[in-house]
Image (cartoon, rainbow, N blue to C red):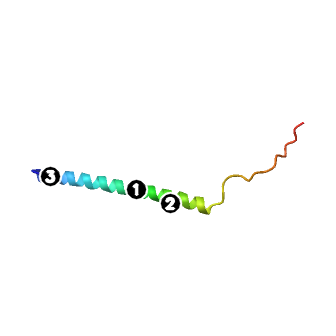
């Protein structure tokens, strides 16, 4: 390609950093999605139970 060694090194490093950043973001996103799904399946529902209306309207 006719690049001098410093330019080739800088290009290779920048591409490598971009790939690593993408992979790290993907891994963290998948871990968060997995943790949320795990909490949904194991934790009891956070919604309050339906209770009868005990107010006395006149």
Q: Secondary structure at mark 1?
A: helix
Q: Is residue 26 left or right of residue 49?
A: left
* Residue receiving disc 3: 6
Q: CA distance from mark 1 to mark 2?
A: 12 Å
* Residue depicted at 61% across the width and 63% down the height: 42
Q: CA distance from mark 2 to mark 3?
A: 42 Å
**Residue 48: x, y in percent?**
71, 52
Count of number-bearing discs = 3
Do the CB atoms of the residues marked 2 and 3 lie less than 8 Å apart? no
Q: Is residue 38 left or right of residue 49?
A: left
**Residue 58: x, y in percent?**
90, 36
Q: Secondary structure at mark 3?
A: helix
Mark linked to residue 15: none
* Residue receiving disc 2: 34
Q: CA distance from mark 3 to mark 1?
A: 30 Å
**Residue 38: x, y in percent?**
55, 62
Q: Residue farthest to the right?
A: 58
Q: Residue farthest to the left?
A: 2
| In front of the other: 7 or 44 | 44
Q: Secondary structure at mark 2?
A: helix
Q: Is residue 27 left or right of residue 6?
A: right
Q: Residue 41 occupies which quadrant of the picture? A: bottom right
Callout 3 crowding tier (Cα within 10 Å): few <14, some 14–19, many ≥20: few
* Residue depicted at 30% across the width and 55% down the height: 19
Above or below, comparing residue 41 to residue 49 in the picture: below
Closer to the eye: label 3 or 1: 1
* Residue receiving disc 1: 26
Sequence order check, earlier mark of 3 and 1: 3
* Residue depicted at 50% across the width and 60% down the height: 34
* Residue depicted at 27% across the width and 56% down the height: 16
């Amino acid at each position: 390609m006719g690049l001098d060694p410093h330019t080739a090194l800088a290009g290779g490093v920048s591409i490598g950093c971009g790939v690593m950043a993408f992979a790290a973001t993907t891994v963290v996103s998948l871990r968060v999605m997995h943790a949320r799904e795990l909490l949904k399946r194991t934790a009891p529902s956070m919604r309050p139970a339906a209770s009868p209306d005990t107010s006395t309207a006149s």
